[in-house]
Amino acid sequence: MEQKVALVTGASRGIGKAIAQSLSQKGYLVAIHFRSQEAHAQELAASIPGSKIFQADLGSEESCVQLAKNVKEAFGRIDVLVNNAGMSVDQLITFAKPADFDQILNVNLKSVFNLTKAVSRFMIKQKGGSIINLTSVVGHTGNGGQSMYAASKGAITAFTKSVAVDLASFGIRANCVAPGFIKTDMTDSLSIEVKEGISAKIPLKRLGNPEEVASCVCFLASSEASYITGSTLHVNGGMYTS
């Protein structure tokens, strides 16, 4: 059988990097997307056999469409799309800037729409595929100072449920993975006191690891999840379970 291909956005660091590595270990060829961290992407690609890197600004519709085309031309197919790339500008709603909200929606939400639309065309022709969108616990619970980010992530959940219905007849599944507080470069820069305060609010009393999120993505991408679509898998140590 032809080796399956996974496109992972925002794959040069953090959770995206762990997802790319885990999918490779499961036998996928991986298309590593990055926006500006080319050195990190090159380093990751060197460690993943058969992988290729692709640069794109996901805030642009044209770039999203071109990214999908480039990956399809390079590998001949796309079986798994992992929409992981995202950003946040934290601010109290009173002081939030409309320009920041527009940017967050472009990167976090519109890129998911644009890539899903573009890649689904290839998946329909292949008569199968899996789309996995990274959301956040904040999209379900809300969080002070993150109204713009929470709105974008909550919208992805609703979008995914609808896409799951649209594409089910073509053998394409669409699901979400919603991480809680995960160890990344951002959390590593926090003070010990702040980390302890966060951990105290988590029933399992610790931050998650990127690999724990990646394992859930791999499960949803696999045939073991063949009867799961339109769902959200929560990975947050018990902070939110509904």
Image (cartoon, rainbow, N blue to C red):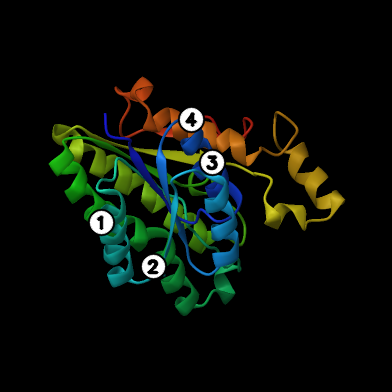
Q: Residues within 10 Å of mark 1 (few under 14, many from 20)?
A: few
224 to the left or right of 104: left
Which three-letter amino acid code belongs to the residue tagged 2?
Asn
Residue placed under numbered mark 4 in the picture: 242
Residue placed under numbered mark 3 in the picture: 21
Frontmost of labels 4 and 2 is: 2
How far is the residue under mark 4 from the one under mark 2?
28 Å
184 to the left or right of 108: right
Q: Residue at x 44, y 28 (%)?
A: 219
Q: Which mark is residue 106?
A: 2
Q: Residue at x 70, y 29 (%)?
A: 203
Q: Secondary structure at mark 3?
A: helix
How far is the residue under mark 1 from the one under mark 4?
40 Å
Frontmost of labels 2 and 1 is: 1
Residue placed under numbered mark 1 in the picture: 73
Q: Nearer the viewer, residue 105 or 223?
A: 223
Q: Residues within 10 Å of mark 4 (few under 14, many from 20)?
A: few
Can residue 60 be seen here? The reply is: yes
- Mark found first going from the N terminus, 1 or 3: 3
